[in-house]
Amino acid sequence: MNFLYVFILLFSWSQISSENIFSTNTTIAHPESGLFLGYVGPYTPSETIIHNSAIFPMTNRTCHFLPLSAVERISSCNWILQRTKRLISGIITLGIGAATLGLSASNSIQISGVQKEVALVSKSLAELSQVTRVFGVQLVKIQSEHIQLAEQLQMTQKLLESAVPTINNHSEAINALESRVSFLQMQFQHSFLYQAITQIFRNDLTLAFLAPQDLHTVVYSVIRQGNLTFNPHFGSLPLAHIVTRLLVRQQLDFIPNTYYETSDPSEIGRLVITSYFAVPRSDQSPFLIYKLITTPFIHDNETVQLAQIPQYLAIDPSNNVTIEWYDQDNSKCDFQLMTTCRDTPPFRSMSNSTCVGQILGGSILSKCLTVSVLPSPFFLRQLRDNLWVTSSAQSLHCVVIPKTEFSMPSFQTSSLNEQLILPPVALVNVTSGSTIACPGFSLMGRPIEQSSPSVVILYNNTLFLNNISVVDVHRHITGNSTWSKRKLMGRELKEIMRFIEQPPFNPTATLSHPMYMFSLYMIFVGFILTSITIIIYCVRRGFIRYLLQGPRVVSLPLPSLTSTT
């Protein structure tokens, strides 16, 4: 096969150093634990903050963009929140009625005066009409040339008067179009502003509220102030997208018109959107980001994989300082198009106190734990380009279909295919243009450039790369003597969790809580004391009665002698 990855065996039994492992476009594999590190790109933490503010004038039509606390302080916006008082409105209505009555009386007096003046004007008009008739007779005597000139001037005046309405109509149409265009522009601005405010409150930072010319100004201002230098790795991204990715915070503030002077009387205040950009230092050495992939495998008839492993790892090979991102940490990061992160986790030095540190340092895996996962027919992950990781419950019988197979007749297919047995856990390098067909899935070899990334395999504290297309990872996992594969949840902890998950048992016997027993004792003692008190009372009452009545004399009749005889 024409393998794309060139591997060189380095039997260096010394301690592995980070300079030999970490480099750009390098995939790291640790077959003894089933951990793979795929290169993502460079990452430079941001240490400089640049802020920029955009100011939008607010009028009565934009009250809905303002916060409620600001609306309550502006009289032209809080008319909805005000309640009309009935007593004041009644007094105002009564005053208006009285004023109307006074005005009507005054108007009647003025009308009578106007009628007198109209009579005088009518008389003056009659006299003027007589004078006009006299002048009319005199004008008849004017020469014919002057009359023709007057007619021409009159015709010209009529033409001008007829053109004036057309010009006025065109002027009104132009003014209407101008007002509509300005209104449409304002509507678009308000729409974009509302969408941007909604995204900002969803913590989806954006620069969509800026006009194109303003966005151009902001982008180049951030680049100039931050002295940004761009990596060729992001050559396909536009500058506006790169600068937007640098946003870490946006803040909205409203400034009422009482705090500044304005020439527009309809302006009630200004809405200020302040954007904060986190810019990295140009002289700082970048970190190398790797995506960590844990592969499930069978251990003691149970499917397990490494536990408590970060999802992304960034390392500075010069000083072994690392940054770790877990699932809950990378929600505000972008590791696909551009390796940026709004919040950078704390830096820490690589040590043997963590599982990843022991794996990369070649130490005994005493900190590595496993967790049970649900079994599946197979597990597939693409590391880089044509490099794949496969995992299954047992070995898979696959077929390698070379590139020439698709141009050959169908009767020659069986003679060109090559059988391939994939171990339960394997690292597979697919040749460019070929296909590995397995039960349930197929691995396609895409055409890639010759400058392909290298693969580093860590085994037995050794750094080497082999020249075969399949690495038996399962053999290294099962034969690993430096890892006891302890469970994250032991048998005792599982029994406790099973006991907690069971429904509670409701006993039918009487509770013998000390508090209840004490109450019963007190009731019993009270009953005995009450009985003794009653007995003593009865005995004393009988004895007193005996003393008061004295002793009783009982007389018994005796038989006499006479009766006997």
Image: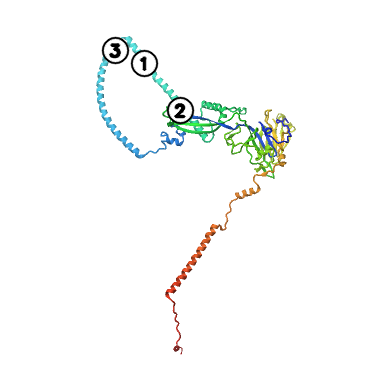
Residue 494 pos. (x, y %): 64, 48
**Viewer-proximal residue among 501 and 514:** 514
Q: Is residue 274 toward the left or the right of residue 485 in the image?
A: left
Q: Dot 1, how many residues are within 10 Å of its Cα: few (below 14), some (14-19), or many (20+)?
A: few
Label for residue 291? none
Give percent across and percent down for residue 2: 72, 30
Question: In the image, what residue type sits under mark 3?
Answer: Leu
Q: Which residue position holds label 3?
A: 139
Sooner in the amino-acid sequence: mark 1 or mark 2: 1
Label 3: which secondary element = helix
Position in image of residue 278 (x %, y %): 56, 32
Measured Cα–Cα span from mark 1 to mark 2:
39 Å
Residue at label 1?
157
Q: Residue 82, can we see it?
A: yes
Q: Please tell me which residue is depicted at 31% across the width and 36% down the height of the picture.
A: 95
The first of marks 1 and 3 along the sequence is 3
Q: Nearer the viewer, mark 2 or mark 3?
A: 2
Which quadrant holds residue 337? Answer: top right
Residue type marked 1: Gln
Structural crowding at the residue carrying mark 3, measured as other residues with C-alpha within 10 Å and reported as few (<14), some (14–19) or many (≥20): few
* Relative vertical location of residue 21 with respect to residue 137 in this rendering, above or below: below
Query: Which labelled disc corresponds to residue 183?
Result: 2
Q: Residue at x 33, y 38 (%)?
A: 90
Q: Answer yes or no: do the residues labelled 1 and 3 have beta carbons within 8 Å? A: no
Q: Secondary structure at mark 1?
A: helix
- The location of residue 362, given as percent across then percent down, is 69, 38
Q: Secondary structure at mark 2?
A: helix
Question: Is the residue 141 above or below the residue 28 in the image?
Answer: above
Image position of 488 (left or right of 552): right
Report the amino acid beneath label 2.
Phe
